[in-house]
Image (cartoon, rainbow, N blue to C red):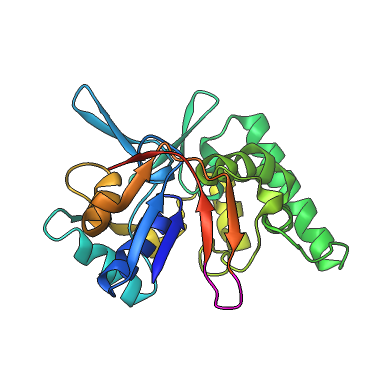
Amino acid sequence: MKIAVLGGGLTGIALANTLTLRGHDVTVLEKEANTGGLCRSETKDGFTFDIGGSHIIFSRDKEVNDFLCDVLTENKDKRKRNTKIFFKGAHVKYPFENGLHDLPPEDRFFCINEFVKNLIALEKGELKKPENFREWIYYTFGRGIAESYMVPYNEKIWNYKTEDMSLHWVDGRIPRPPVEDIIKSAIGIETEGYTHQSVFTYPIHGGIEAMVNALKEPVKDKIITDCEVTGVVRGGNEGGGKVGHGGNAG
């Protein structure tokens, strides 16, 4: 069976890798000049930067975690999180809701005041259940944290509007912060959020793109870049179809 994978980001490359190792004839069609999508890395003056935000390798699913780590072979190590958010000239502890004390006073008040107001409305049953990711952010954190950080940050790293994102992936990925932690954070008592990813795996060399490059090794000769898909035509009763495109092989 011949299979076309549309997009050479992490998902597309991982899929092509799996299908190829299972014996399928796979071609990856990538719109950009390079593969990797939001998992690309660039090196400048000896420093490597991941262009798509804070990519790390962790999963509560052992099979997934083992797969990603095995792909990197020896090019990996454990790292302890040391992350700051640059906000209005200040370096705020990550996650944002655990670093409220690092904010300028007016922003700190805005975040904690809106969080408390939101909490009261929730207890009174005045908030409707969220139907998309953007609504979930407001529902969970209140307007202050949502507008100051959560919405712009997530739209940057996902390169997608939060109102167009579903909720099925959120549970277990973004923990709901305990009320006590938010209050402690606002008055300067140290708290730690997202503890499930406080220690993670990361490539020693090449940034997060090293993982994409390792995954694409079995399919590197079956990737067409600078390739914009112009249409997909579904096949007949026997299935299959055709993909219209133009691009560069290799």
The image shows residue 41 at horizontal and vertical percentages of: 31, 37
Q: In the image, is residue 120 above or below residue 213?
A: below
Q: Say which quarter of the image contains residue 136.
A: bottom right
Q: Is residue 148 visible?
A: yes
The image shows residue 13 at horizontal and vertical percentages of: 36, 56
Q: Residue at x 21, y 55 (%)?
A: 217
Q: Is residue 109 magenta?
A: no
Name the quadrant of the C terminus: top left
Name the quadrant of the N terminus: bottom left
Q: Is residue 9 visible?
A: no
Q: Residue at x 32, y 76 (%)?
A: 63
Q: Residue at x 60, y 40 (%)?
A: 149
Q: In the drawing, does residue 78 fall left or right of residue 96?
A: left
Closer to us: 49 or 243 = 243
Residue range highlighted in magenta: 236-240
The image shows residue 178 at horizontal and vertical percentages of: 59, 63
